[in-house]
Image (cartoon, rainbow, N blue to C red):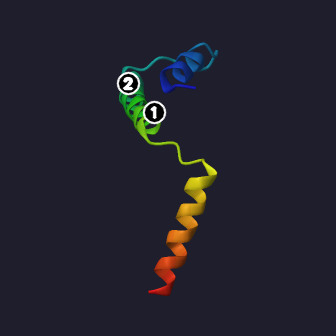
Amino acid sequence: MAPTLLYQADLAKPNFFADPAQAAAIEHVQRLYEQLQALQSAAPQKKHFAYFVQKMLNKKEKKRV
């Protein structure tokens, strides 16, 4: 769940109070979260068996040198 959604859920709790400094920190954390999400979705998916085999072959070749 996104940081801002978690913060909003926490604000609904009885002993949790809004704080301007916390809100500013959450905005910053949210931006970082969104940047990381964008990087993750832009990265190539490396879950394919062929990728795994190629990676293992490359490791073996490096060990021989």
Q: Relative to 58, is 9 on the left or the right?
A: right
Instruction: Give residue 3's position: percent from left, percent from top.
Output: 50, 26
Q: Quadrant of residue 28?
A: top left
Which quadrant does the N terminus fall into? Answer: top right
Instruction: Give residue 59's position: percent from left, percent from top.
Output: 52, 73
The tag on residue 37 is 1
Front position in the image: 46 or 40: 46
Which quadrant does the C terminus fall into? Answer: bottom left
The tag on residue 27 is 2
Instruction: Give residue 27's position: percent from left, percent from top.
Output: 38, 24
Residue type, numbered disc 2:
Glu
Give whichever of discs 2 and 1 has the lower sequence position.
Answer: 2
Q: Which of the two discs, 2 and 1, sits closer to the camera?
A: 1
- Cα separation between marks 2 and 1: 15 Å
Q: Relative to 32, is 16 on the left or the right?
A: right
At mark 2, the secondary structure is: helix
Residue at (37% x, 28% y) in the render? 31
At mark 1, the secondary structure is: helix
Residue at (38% x, 29% y) in the render? 25
Q: Quadrant of residue 12?
A: top right
Front position in the image: 8 or 46: 46
Q: Is residue 56 above or below residue 1?
A: below
Residue at (52% x, 42% y) in the render? 45
Badge 1: how crowded within 10 Å, few (<14), some, or many (20+)?
few
Residue at (41% x, 36% y) in the render? 42
Residue type, numbered disc 1:
Gln
Instruction: Give residue 54's position: percent from left, percent from top.
Output: 54, 62
